[in-house]
Amino acid sequence: TILVLDFGSQTSHLILRRLRSDVRVYAEMLPCTVKLADLPFKPKGIVLSGGPSSVYDQGAPHVDPAVFELGVPILGICYGCQEIAWRINSENVARGEIREYGHADVTIHNDGDSHVNRLFTGLGGTMHAYMSHFDKLVKLPEAFVVVASTKNSEYAGIAHQTKPIYGVQFHPELEHTPRGSEILRNFAVDICGAKPSWVMKDFIQKEIVRIRHLVGDHDQVIGAVSGGVDSTVAAKLMKEAIGDRFHAILVDNGVMRLNECEQVKETLDKHLGINLTVIDGAELFLSRLKGVTEPEKKRKIIGGTFIDLFQEKVRSMEEEAKDKPDAGPIVWLLQGTSVSFRGPSATIKTHHNVGGLPDTLKLKLIEPLREMFKDEVRKFGEELGIHRDLVMRHPFPGPGIAIRILGEVTPERVAIARAADNIFISEIKAAGVYDEMSQAYVAISQDRAVGVQGDARVYGYIAILRAVKTLDFMSAEPYEFDFALLKKISTRIVNEVDGIARVTYDITSKPPGTIEME
Ligand code: XMP
C-alpha cells in the first residue's frame, strides 16, 4: 500500500486515482495528521499531498514526525514538498513574488542515473506541468539537490542526496501534467517497490474483511438505496459481507422516473438478493411540495421529508430488534456515496442524496466508496455481478424529477415529465448512444406554449431535453446530437405525451449552466 497523507487540496483524490487506475498499485488516503502508530499496516511509501495552507502559518497542518523516521520513500507534492523543506529549516519556504497557476514548462535535470534522478527516469528535457501555488521553496534544503526547475521555481523538483525523499512543486496527479502518471509510477513502483498488480477484486475482498471486522457478528446495518450505481454497489457489498444483517431502505418519493421504483425493487430484491424494504412516501412528498415553486425550497422539502421517513423507519426497526433476542442492535449506517458528488456545487444547490443522513440518528458510519470515483465504482459493481445496465446508468439526483419540473410539482406534471423522459431515454438507448453521454433527461417548463396538432390548437408545456458529456460533473458540455435523432425524439414526445406542445434542446455548457435545471 502507498499511503497518501491529505493536506486538503482539491486534487488529493486524484493522486489515489492515478496510483490505482494508471499505475495499478493500491493506495489509501488518510488525513495528514494521522499518527503512524495507529496504522494497521506499514506503507511501502508515503505521498504528501498539496493543500491550501501555508506551512509557516500558525495552526498549519503538519504530519506526524514519525513519517520521516519510518525509512520508507516519501514524495511531497506542492504543500507536501514545502512541508519536507520546512521541517528541515523553516526559512526554506516563503511566499513567492507571483502566484503560479496553470501551465509551466518544467526542465528536468537528468544528469546520470544516480538515485536522485529516479523520480524522472524516462523523462528528460522539458515537460508540461500544472502549477498552483503562491508559496515556494526559496532555499534548497540541506542535503538535497535540484532535479527540476521552472522559470519561476528554481526548486520545482528536489531529491535527498542519500535518502529516498523527493519533492515536486507541480501536480503530477492532474491531467494537465501529461506525464504525471509516469512520475507517480517511478515513485510507487521503482522507488517504493510496490507491485503494479492491483485489481478491483483485491479491493472487494479487502473491503469485505474490513466490514466484517468493523460490524462484528451481531450488529445490524441500515442504509438507504436509490437504484443508482453508488448505493446499489454499496448495498451489494454489504450483502456479500454480512448477508441479511444489512437492511436496505428505498424511499419512494413520488418523483422517481417512470416505473423506476418497481424496477429498483425487482433488481435489488430479486436479482441481487438484498434485504430491501420500500417505504411508500409518494403522497406525503407530493403533498408537502404542493404550491412550492422555489428550487431551493423544493430541494429542502424533499431532503427533509426523506430524513423524516428514514428516521421513523430506523426507530421502528430498533423497536422490532428489541423483541427479537437473536437480532443484534442497529448500530451502523451505510453511506454509499462515491467521491463524484461531493464537489463544491453544494454551495450553489442544496444537495440531497440518499447518503446524506443526519447524525441525530446516532449511528456509526460505514463508507466503503468514500474514496472511489464513479468509474471505479462501476468496475467494482461489475466485479460484484451487478448487471451492466445498472452499472452504466447515468446518475440521477436525490430530489428526482422534482428539480426537472420547473415551478410547481403536481401529480399531473410529474406524469407528463415522466412520460417525456421515458421516450427520450428509450430512444437514446435504442440509437446506441446512451453510453456516449454522461447524463440525459427531460425537464418541463413552468409556462405553456401554443402548438397545432391535427387541426386543433394545443396549449401545453415545453419539454426541454438535456444531455451532457462530462468527466467530473463539475464542468460539462452539451452532447452533440445527430439532428435526425433529435427530430425523431421531438416528434414522438409531442405526439405521445398529452400536455407537451413544444420540444427544445438545451445547449448550455456548465459553467455557466448547471447540469440540472434547478
Ligand atoms: P449540477 O446541477 O449541480 O449537477 O450541475 C451536478 C451533478 O449532481 C447531480 N445532482 C444531485 N445529486 N442530489 C444528488 O444526489 C442532489 O441534490 C443533486 N443535485 C444535482 C446532478 O444530477 C449532476 O449529476
Image (cartoon, helix red, strand yellow):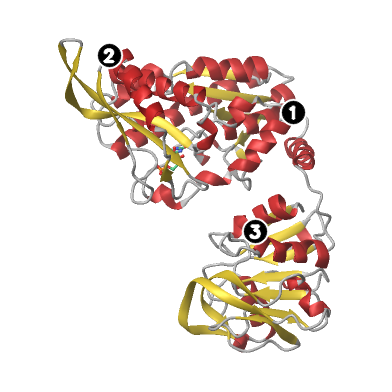
Q: Is residue 176 left or right of residue 459?
A: right
Residue at 31% from the left image edge and 25% from the top image edge: 288
Q: Label 2: which residue?
A: 498
Question: Which picture quadrant has residue 411?
Answer: top left
Locate residue 80, reporting x and y percent.
Answer: 64, 71
Mark in front: 2 vs 1: 2
Eyeballing the image, is 292 above or below 149?
above
Q: CA distance from mark 1 to mark 3?
A: 29 Å
The residue at which mark 3 appears reads as: 15
Earlier in the chain: of badge 2 and badge 3, it is 3
Q: Helix or strand or loop: what does disc 3 sit on? A: helix
* Residue found 52% across the figure and 41% down from its top: 359
Local packing at callout 1 (Cα closer than 10 Å; few below 14, some 14-19, many 20+) is many
Closer to viewer: mark 2 or mark 3: 2
Q: Which residue is pictured at 50% across the width and 84% down the height?
A: 96
Mark 1 residue element: helix
State whether residue 399 appears in this view: no
Residue where numbered disc 1 is placed: 240
Residue 166 lies, in percent from the top left, at 72, 75
Where residue 226 appears, x then y in whole percent? 52, 27
Q: Does label 1 or label 3 sit earlier along the sequence?
A: 3
The quarter of the rendering in which ligand 1 is drawn is: top left
